[in-house]
Image (cartoon, grey):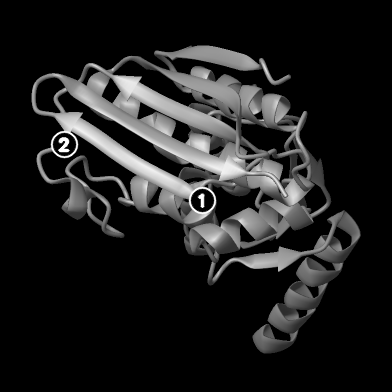
Amino acid sequence: MLVPILKQGDYLIASIQSALTDADLLRLRDDLVDQVGRYRSRGVIVDVTALDVMDSFAVRTISSLSQMIKLRGAETVIVGIQPEVAFAMVQLGLTLSGVGTALDLEEGLAYLNTRAARGDRARR
Amino acid sequence: MLDGEVRVAIATDSDIVAARQAGRQLASQLDFSSSDLTVIAAAVSEIAPNILEYARRGEVEIRLMEKAGRRGVLVVARDQGPGIRDIPLALQDGYSTSGSLGLGLPGARRLMDEFEVQSEMGKGTTVTMRKWAR
């Protein structure tokens, strides 16, 4: 299942539409890391609202996606982790530490805008 | 009367998605919370990759069960792979012979109420786990 990636200004928005296989997750990671360079994006939002489960492979892949994008000079925020998905992740001992998270797309955009504003000030 | 049963052959990673969705679907007939349904799906998603990783193919069987007035779901993952040499070691967090994170078996064990692993070298591995509804 291909995850559509939309370009929205300085940001990329990957909106997961259904359950993903491990191979789909790896492809999403590689596509985003590639497109951040192609579109010179400053931030990436990964919307996981439609994901049925975040197992250890998904969490590991999303962590590495976020770290790789950081190395490419952009910020990542994961939005839409559902309450029951969060519950199962905590039971599994999976924390997504070091990865930005926000409630939904709107909050995710606010998160990236705040980060971008801070970055602009730092550069002056 | 409980007679739900699903078997999913595991040979590709999309079979893992099918197995966890079948598990959730079947378990949703019982009085599980939506968090518990996700927990069951996550447990299937943690153990099924071991089948691909070590045995290349196998199956996941999911069944509804009833015992002493309690209802629950039984998940059996079986393969005819190489087997696990040291089961207690394989159940430790972070232990893996394949270079993975090593969270599959211990993770699934944390998610379910009952969990057991039977394995014979050269014959295969069977992971049996149960979760009881409220």
Q: Residues within 10 Å of mark 1 (few under 14, many from 20)?
A: few
Q: Are marks 2 and 1 in contact (CB under 8 Å)?
A: no
In the drawing, does residue B62 fall left or right of residue B59? right
- The residue that appears at 66% across and 17% down in the rendered structure is B4
Q: Position of residue A101 (x, y in %)?
A: 70, 65
- Label 1 amino acid? Asp
Near-viewer residue (B10 or A39) = B10
Residue corresponding to mark 2:
B84
Instruction: Name the mark nearer the viewer: 2 or 1.
Output: 1
A113 or B7, nearer to the observer: B7
Q: Residue at the right extreme?
A: A106
In the structure shown, which secondary structural element does the residue marked by tag 1 occupy? Answer: loop
- Up the image or down, A10 lies above or below A13; here it is below
> Residue placed at 54% from the left, 71% from the top?
A98
Which residue is found at the position 14% from the left and 19% from the top? B123
Image height of B18 relative to B86, above or below: above
Indicate whether A123 appears above or below B114.
below
On the image, the x and y values in percent for residue B64 come to: 62, 26
Crowdedness of circle 2 by 10 Å Cα count: few (<14), some, many (20+)? many
Q: Position of residue A39 (x, y in %)?
A: 67, 45
Q: Please name the residue that numbered disc 1 is placed on.
A: B113
Can residue A12 be spotted in the picture? no
Quick one: A112 or A49, which is closer to the camera?
A: A49
Q: Quadrant of residue A19?
A: top right
